[in-house]
Image (spheres, rainbow, N blue to C red):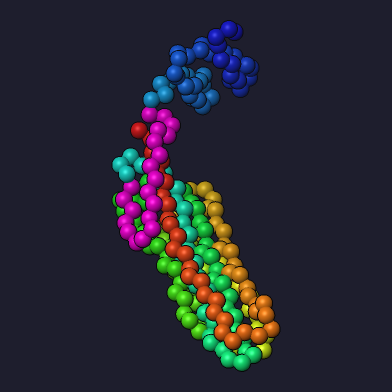
Amino acid sequence: MSGSVCWFNGAAITTTAAGSAGQILTSNGTGAPTWASAGGIGFTQIVQQVFTSNGTYTPTAGMKYCVVEMLGGGGAGGGCAAVSGNNQSVGAGGGAGEYARAVFTASTIGSVQSVTIGSAGSANPGSSGDAGGTTSLGSLMSAHGGAGGGISASNGQPQINGSLGGTGGSTTGNVGQEIRSPGAPGMGCRPLRAHSRFHILTSVGRVFRTRLVQIWIS
């Protein structure tokens, strides 16, 4: 059996001759396996495209599969109002954008797909922050932005919880199971001192990237 390959024919274990260097063993169903050239088999190159603003994704020629990762825009923190005397006001941090990852075939992607990058939430002095925008790849995939941070009343000893992270995006036409994670919540806030004449807490949401990793066989 030296230099041979063992296989089971359904009734007994038998052998087939060893192939040449560089060949791969190919199944023929219930028949004996055969050796074949490895040319044209396996992934030979990976190309990455990164989008930080709206645009159009055009697959590279020969692309077979596309791995897409995206994040929704972050929500802005709440902007505290001006207070007087012993009054106080606090603002919460905005939530992070949702994360999503999925794999698509070249036929599903088609010739082009529009890319939309969710914008960061805008901070508003004296009021709640705006939510982050939704990031998407055409109608195939989306990741929602985080909620904007709220503000507390400008009296007493206020405190406020952080806003929720982005969630609820969708994916369609993907190969296998997607990976999706809601954004982290924003940080809550409460005064550190008993008295504060003027207290401002604002944060600006992040604009995140969408990455498309192309894999193809030559």
Residue 199 at least partly seen: yes
The answer to whether residue 148 is above or below residue 1 is: below
Question: In which quarter of the view is residue 164 placed?
Answer: bottom right
Q: Residue furthest top?
A: 2
Horizontal side of 208 relative to 14 (left or right) equals left
Horizontal side of 141 relative to 87 (left or right) equals left
* Residue nearer the viewer, 17 or 118: 118
The answer to whether residue 26 is above or below residue 105 is: above
**Any magenta on residue 93?**
no
Residue at x-position 46% and y-position 72%? 121
Horizontal side of 135 relative to 162 (left or right) equals left
Residue at x-position 59% and y-position 84%? 89
Residue 179, how many percent across, how many down?
54, 53
Residue at x-position 38% and y-position 58%? 52
Residue at x-position 40% and y-position 39%? 46
Residue 2, how many percent across, how many down?
58, 7
Residue 169, how many percent across, how many down?
50, 64
Q: Residue furthest bottom?
A: 85
Residue range of the region highlighted in magenta in the rendering: 40-59
Quarter in which the C terminus is drawn: top left
Q: How many marks?
A: 0
**Any magenta on residue 44?**
yes
Residue 47, how many percent across, how many down?
38, 42
* Residue nearer the viewer, 148 or 91: 91
